[in-house]
Image (tube, helix red, strand yellow):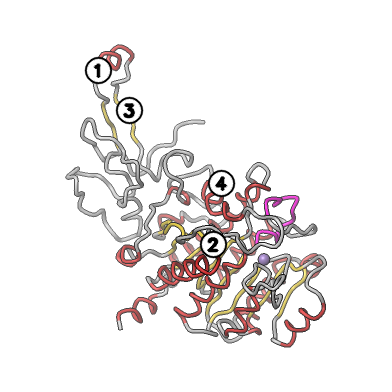
Amino acid sequence: MSKRPPRHSTNGHASPGEHPSPKPSPRRGRGLEPGRGPEPDPLGHPHAEAGSHPSAGHVHGAAGRYGTEWGWDREFEVYGDLDLPSYVGPTTFANLPWVTDAAELQARRVDVAIVGAPFDDMVTHRPGARFGPRAIREAQAQSGSLNSLQLDVRPFEELTVVDAGDANIVPAYWERGHAMIYRKVHEVAAAGAIPIVLGGDHSITWPSASAIAEVRRPGSIGIVHFDAHADTAPDSFGQLASHGTPMRRLIESGAVLGRNFVQVGLRGYWPPVPVLEWMRVHGMRWHLMTEIEERGSEAVIRDAIAEALDGPDAIYLSVDIDVVDPGSAPGTGTPEPGGMLPRELLRAVRQIVGAVELAGMDIVEVSPPYDWAESTAMIANRVALEAISALAVKRRAGRPVRFERAVAAARR
Ligand SMILES: [Mn+2]
């Protein structure tokens, strides 16, 4: 494979002896927004362009004895964090800058922020989804300026996207875990950015979507929920906050109206009749996997969008990776044969995000210990990338992406 030419690092002549810092530079990603020039370089490099590490460019190594003897002091290209291969350096989503501070998210006018929710205390079957966020971040071979062939757009050129880090999770303390996820998502959304939350088990949708509903207005968002399971149980073995119950909690609290809660891909042998009855009574709508088989995914998704937006003006997207057939996505907690193809799901995500105002999103139930060859984590990674690319197309067309009203409300 030939060397990819560096995109941003050609002008940043670094001082001799200067090395990349071990942490992602907060400078990365700046100036990727159109119409915004590079910011002044605190280190005084004449043309250290935005998007590159201050030390990116050509450097001469230290000229020690062996350096001279073997040519190790020659001039070599040095790459910025964003342009390095994805397996080099700290693990952030797509090598993007790691920006955990809410004030900084706001100052940078971040469009999309990845949020990790490494939490799986509430699973009822296979555990392991706590390792999901890290696996999803890692499951990507390309880095630097990505080019979506599907949508003909370079997402990171159009949008400011960062990795906002993980919620402050510790094990075996579920009340605290949900509280930390709620606060983190709230913080990101209140800064006007669209959170893409990487789970974690599906219980995290309760605090996550609650936070989004609150930043906008309870009852003002619809939810499109991809899953093999309805996740509307009253409780699981007595636990109200289980990963089998979040959708019921969201409807009970009024965060989302039942009639705007739309499920896609349900199949198998759950839920039982009384739970389906509760769903019906609350106006929920769902599209079984068999309907996708009969009508095709695109037609079903078109209906799901209309149902979720029957009143609301924005959509929260919740993607349980087990909506995909376990043949393609084995690394999950509660696999159910007979699911969607990865290409159907990715197309559906492009279709939805391209058509609606996206309020927030989560991708959950990736359990890396059960994964094979990273296939499940890769699908989850691409679900996020497809959503980001669809948002980039909107930005390019001059349509709104950020939720500016959140920022305005916070100022009042
Ligand atoms: Mn689920």
Q: Secondary structure at mark 2?
A: helix
Q: Which residue is mark 2?
A: 387
Q: Secondary structure at mark 1?
A: loop
Binning the other alpha carbons within 10 Å of mark 2 as few (below 14), some (14 to 19) or many (20 upward) gives: many
Q: Is residue 23 left or right of residue 385?
A: left
Work out how far the residue at label 1 is from the one at label 2, CA to CA, in angstroms.
Answer: 49 Å
- The residue positioned 53% from the left and 78% from the top of the image is 314
Under 8 Å from ligand 1: the CB of mark 4? no
Q: Which residue is mark 1?
A: 64
Q: Quadrant of residue 407?
A: bottom left
Q: State which image quarter holds ligand 1.
A: bottom right
Which label sits in the foreground, 1 or 2?
1
Q: Which residue is mark 3?
A: 76
Residue stretch in magenta: 320-332
Which of the numbered marks, if any, corresponds to residue 139? 4
Q: Secondary structure at mark 4?
A: loop
Which of the numbered marks, if any, corresponds to residue 72? none
Work out how far the residue at label 3 is from the one at label 4, CA to CA, in angstroms.
Answer: 28 Å
- The residue positioned 75% from the left and 66% from the top of the image is 296
Outermost residue, top direction? 69
